[in-house]
Amino acid sequence: MSTIHYILSTVSIGFANTFIDWFFIGFLFHKFQALTPQTWRPENYSSYTYSTLLSFLFGGLFTLFYLKIGSHYALPGNLWSQTQLGLLCFACFSFISIVNNSIYINYDKRFVAGTLIASCLNYISAAIIASLFYLG
């Protein structure tokens, strides 16, 4: 993978991650945050900036993960294989953590569902995007 492909993959995953999080957490399931007001910090420009920067960091780290590990697991050019990689990463890295946090933190169950959906789609889209820029 060339440097330009790495950067393009990182940026593409960062934008996809930001959009998916906005749509599922910020748009569809945001109203359920209001049911647990004592849980949330006030939203402001800096919280959105940090969240966006973390999305791009996720893009860079996932691209690196795909380059070093994922490309050996998933079949090149096979959408189902990339989806399986994304699902495996979601199950390993997010599912347990999100569910475990919801046991101890006062989140509304519907907000947790939205977070799980967004996280799952983030990993699937990251795997697909990284595979598109990986030239093996």
Image (spheres, helix red, strand yellow):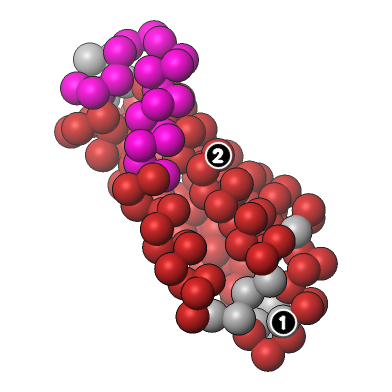
> What secondary structure is found at the residue carrying circle 1?
loop
Magenta-drawn stretch contains 75: yes
Magenta-drawn stretch contains 31: no
Which residue appears at 35% of the width and 41% of the height? 89
Q: Tell me where residue 75 appears, x and y as whole percent.
A: 30, 13
Quadrant holding the N terminus: top left
Which residue appears at 76% of the width and 64% of the height? 30
Q: Residue lying furthest bottom in this view?
A: 38
Magenta stretch secondary structure, dominant: helix
Label disc, if present, on residue 9 of the rendered structure: none
> What secondary structure is found at the residue carrying circle 2?
helix
Name which quarter of the figure residue 74 lies in.
top left
Name which quarter of the figure residue 121 lies in.
top right
Residue linked to disc 1? 36
Which residue appears at 22% of the width and 15% of the height? 136
Q: Tell me where residue 49 appears, x and y as whole percent.
A: 58, 66
The earlier-in-sequence mark between 2 and 1 is 1
Q: Amino acid at mark 1?
A: Thr
Give the magenta range. 71-90
C-alpha span from label 2 to label 1: 25 Å
**In the displayed structure, does residue 116 sit left or right of residue 61?**
right
Q: Nearer the viewer, mark 2 or mark 1?
A: 1
Residue linked to disc 2? 121
**In the displayed structure, does residue 5 sit left or right of residue 31?**
left
Task: Tell me the crowding category of disc 1: few under 14, some 14 to 19, or many 20 or more residues within 10 angstroms, Cα based.
Answer: few
Label 2 close to label 1 by CB (< 8 Å): no
Name which quarter of the figure residue 86 lies in.
top left
Q: Nearer the viewer, residue 14 or 75?
A: 75
